[in-house]
Amino acid sequence: MGLKLSVIAVDVFLEKYKTRIFVGTLKKEKNQFLFIYDDRYLRTQNIIPLGPELPLTKKEFRSDVLFPSFEDRIPSRQNPAYPEYCKAMGINTKENNPLILLSTIGKRGPSSFVFEPHFERSFSVQDLIEFRKALGLTTREFAEIFEIPQASLNALERNRSSGKDLLKRLELIIKFPDVALYLLIMNGGFISFDKWQNAKDVLERLKS
């Protein structure tokens, strides 16, 4: 496929019961970390700051080091379970990009804030179709292996749905192919061996 995605920022969401609110974005500019609250979030009732160093009285914050509220979400490398965290999210234990670490092993924590990767480019419907065809899978096979509703996949490919959440999930599969390989191994037993091997080979190439 030739598709390469790069995490250039972290989008922050506040999850409440049955709701998810966009909070703001963390990025890195000229060796400084920049966090910007979303205007709508600042106008929302009963909201909470991301952390004590990020009060709601300002919109933008800059720091030469990662803000403590973000730093606290990255597990310590001294934690015996650290390699397992990395393996589960399909990243190398030597990964040191804080944006990648936050949007994978630091994605969820004790607070209600959730971190999602913001990619350099958007994953389009055409990218999705090319990815599925490169794997040699039908929509039914693709949906079952990657645990997504086939009806949603069909609607997306036929431009009957925007499918933003589905496209974001597929972005993660492309960016972290170890996750896709895990799903293929766990869920791909129903397809022929030749199809399974082809899909495995494609995902292995994405890792390189």
Image (cartoon, grey):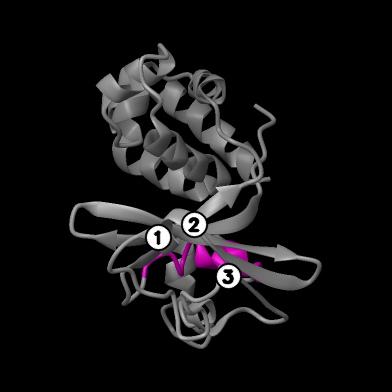
Q: Which residue is mark 1?
A: 43
Q: Which one is in front in this view, the residue at disc 2 or the one at disc 3?
A: 2
Compared to residue 193, the image places residue 27 above or below, namely: below
Of mark 2 and mark 3, the one earlier in the sequence is 2
Disc number placed over residue 35 in the picture, else none: none
Q: Which residues are magenta?
A: 96-108
Q: Which residue is mark 2?
A: 39
Dot 1 falls on a residue whose secondary structure is helix
Q: Position of residue 116 (x, y in %)?
A: 47, 55
Q: Which percent across, then down, holds residue 54? A: 51, 79
Q: CA distance from mark 3 to mark 1?
A: 39 Å
Which of the 4 quarters of the picture holds residue 152?
top left
Residue 55 forms part of the magenta stretch: no
**Residue 93, numbered circle:** 3
The reply to whether dot 2 and dot 1 touch (C-beta < 8 Å) is yes
Name the residue at 48% across, 73% down.
83
Image quarter (top left, top right, bottom left or bottom right) of the N terminus? top right
